[in-house]
Image (cartoon, grey):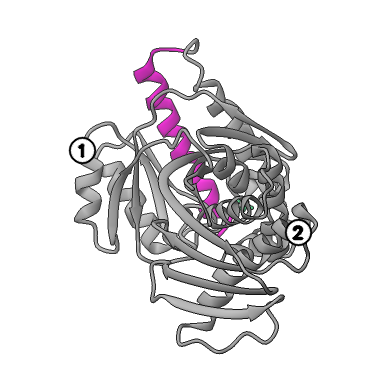
Amino acid sequence: MTVSSAPGKVYLFGEHAVVYGEPAVPCAIERRATVTVEARDDDHVRVEASDLSLDGFTVEYAGTTDGRPDVDVPASLVEAAMGYVDAAVEQAREAVGRPDAGFDITVESSIPLGAGLGSSAAVTVAGIDAATRELGHELSARELADRAYRAEAAVQDGQASRADTFCSAVGGAVRVEGDDCRAIETPNLPFVVGFDGGAGDTGELVAGVRALKKEYDFAADTVSTIGDLVRTGERLLDPENGSADDRLTELGRLMNFNHGLLESLGVSSRSLDSMVWAAREAGAHGAKLTGAGGGGCIVALDPTPETLTALQFTPGCEEAFRAELATDGVRRLE
Ligand code: MEV
């Protein structure tokens, strides 16, 4: 039996634009998906997911997703979660050259599904890592990130950047621009997350931005403006460029701009906007949605307890928490 965990993430800057080759800076946070894998004697895959923020479910299928039995939870949830586990299994089988390998898999996660905190990337990274190790093969962090990216892209019809999966595999703060992925140093970033209890459909939201970009020049310009903003923001991560307080203040301003640009691309929502405003009014340096949007989470920058407290009393905010940077990516637990 092998057990691996991988962290979720928040975007300091750059989601959506990163899909079109602009840079982005996601940061791994200490909320993890843990995947336990045990090899089977046949080619079946049995998946138990007891804590994916909704009802638990168990499904067993042979080889592919075809012929899965009906289970008593919303089909969309099963499809979403199973799609990533399935794609992870395929990547592990391919990495080891064992197309017929079967597994019993258990998924546990403290990352809400589809809420902008990288739940699918974390499940995919931890799943590939645990399944390949179970077959006696250890992938490097880069190879793992690459396979997780291919798995995520397959589920999202090719519409994925390397940002979520690379960040989850290597941990810490990272910079992703096209195929160029690297770890970067950041000052202590006092992240506060607000969660509205909902979720967005990443594939649909990404497709929506793509369509808008085709239809309107302003949307294409907005995507490249987000890229410029990220390039400005990353200079502020360097301690050479001003006092820690000044840099935090300016990073927050840029997060506010980034939220406005995402809003104009149509990926915010009423609850995300109201959490963003609650954070700003509480004195956060800045706040923005994180991830694909449509519902889910915002991230604010505030070293004081004010934003956390304000979010806890904001209508539409179901949970608020301080998110520590996860310096480790994938962790091999057993
Ligand atoms: C989703 O967490 C982030 C997006 O930029 C999509 C991607 O990068 O694959 C919206």
Secondary element type, mark 1: loop
Residue 252, compared with residue 58, is above or below; it is: above
Q: How many marks?
A: 2
Residue reaching furthest to the top? 240
Q: Which residue is mark 2?
A: 214
Is the C-beta of the residue carrying label 2 under 8 Å from the nearest atom of ligand 1?
no
Q: Residue at x 55, y 52 (%)?
A: 126
Q: Which residues are magenta?
A: 242-266
Q: Which residue is mark 1?
A: 305
Calculate the distance from the C-alpha at mark 1 to the C-alpha at mark 2: 42 Å
Three-letter amino acid code of the residue under disc 2:
Lys
Magenta span: helix, strand or loop, mainly? helix
- Amino acid carrying mark 1 in the image: Pro
Residue 303 belongs to magenta span: no
Instruction: Point out residue 163 in the picture as x, y percentages from the top left corner.
Output: 62, 44
Instruction: Specify which label sits upstream in the sequence, 1 or 2.
Output: 2
Residue 329, image x, y percentages = 52, 39
Query: Where is residue 117 shown, x and y percent of the image?
Result: 47, 52
Q: Is residue 237 visible?
A: yes
Q: Is 243 situated left or right of 88 in this image?
A: left
The x and y percentages for residue 102 are 66, 69
SS label for mark 2: helix
Indicate if the residue with disc 1 has its beta carbon within 8 Å of ligand 1: no
Instruction: Work out whether 14 lies above or below 151.
Output: above
Label at residue 130 = none
Residue sitting at x 63%, y 33%: 228
Q: Nearer the viewer, residue 274 or 126?
A: 126
